[in-house]
Structures are given as C-alpha cells and as structure tokens.
Amino acid sequence: MSEDDTFFIDNELRIACADAVELVTEFLDDALSPEDRANFEIHLSLCEGCQAFLDQINRTITLTSESKTTTVDVLPDNFDALLDALDSATSKPETGD
Ligand SMILES: [Zn+2]
C-alpha cells in the first residue's frame, strides 16, 4: 500500500455501512482520524443509504438542540430507530409488479 493508492480508490465504499454508522458520532464530533474521516467521507459520497442516515441524524440533532439546547448522544439504541426511519425513507415504492 502506498499513499498513491488513495487516489485510485474512488469507486469503492472503502468501509462497510456498519462501520460508517459507527463513525458518524465521531465524525459529528470532528473526532475522526484523518484516515477514518477520509474513509467516511468517501463512503458517504458513494452511499445514498448512509447519506440519508447522516441526514436523519443531523435532523434529529437539530430538532432536539432547538428544543433543548443540549447535546444529543447518538447511541446504538437510537440507531435502531433511525435505521427504521432510514429504511422507510429509502425504500423505493415498487412501480408495478
Ligand atoms: Zn453506507
């Protein structure tokens, strides 16, 4: 592996969705290492599901912070609910059988 490899990998997700999900909180905290951050951002740029997921989290945090002005802990428990929302948000209606 050389650093140059980074520039050739632009068509891969780099990390699994499950890994991306785990990086979300640190990403929002700006606590990712440069490598993790790059992987996360590349994954996000290619993965509509994770884009929607991050959007859901951002929306949740925004809504909550507006009403409580407190930081939201995004916990695995919350992920389940968010993933449910994501699932219904990304489920494309079947157009005919
Ligand atoms: Zn993903």
Image (cartoon, rainbow, N blue to C red):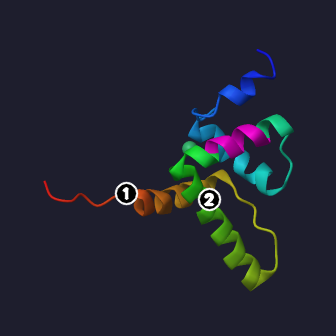
Find residue 62 and report its image quarter. Answer: bottom right
Q: Is residue 14 left or right of residue 35?
A: left
Location of residue 82 in the rendering, given as x and y in whole percent from the top left corner = 55, 60
Residue at the disc numbered 1: 91
Q: Residue at x 51, y 51 (%)?
A: 49
Q: Is mark 2 on a helix, strand or loop?
A: helix
Q: Which residue is drawn at 76% across and 77% down?
A: 65
Front-most of residues 41 and 77 = 41
Secondary structure type for disc 1: loop
Q: What percent of the width, then of the height, locates residue 79?
A: 60, 55
Q: Residue at x 79, y 49 (%)?
A: 26
The quadrant where ligand 1 appears is top right
- Amino acid type at mark 1: Ser
What residue range appears in magenta? 37-43
- Relative side of 2 to 82, left or right: right
Residue 40: quarter of image: top right
> Which residue was labeled with disc 2?
78
Q: Residue furthest top?
A: 1
Can you tell which of label 1 and label 2 is closer to the viewer?
Answer: 1
Label whose residue precedes the other's in the sequence (1 or 2): 2
Quadrant of image for the N terminus: top right
In front: 70, or 24? 24
- Check residue 75 for magenta coloring: no
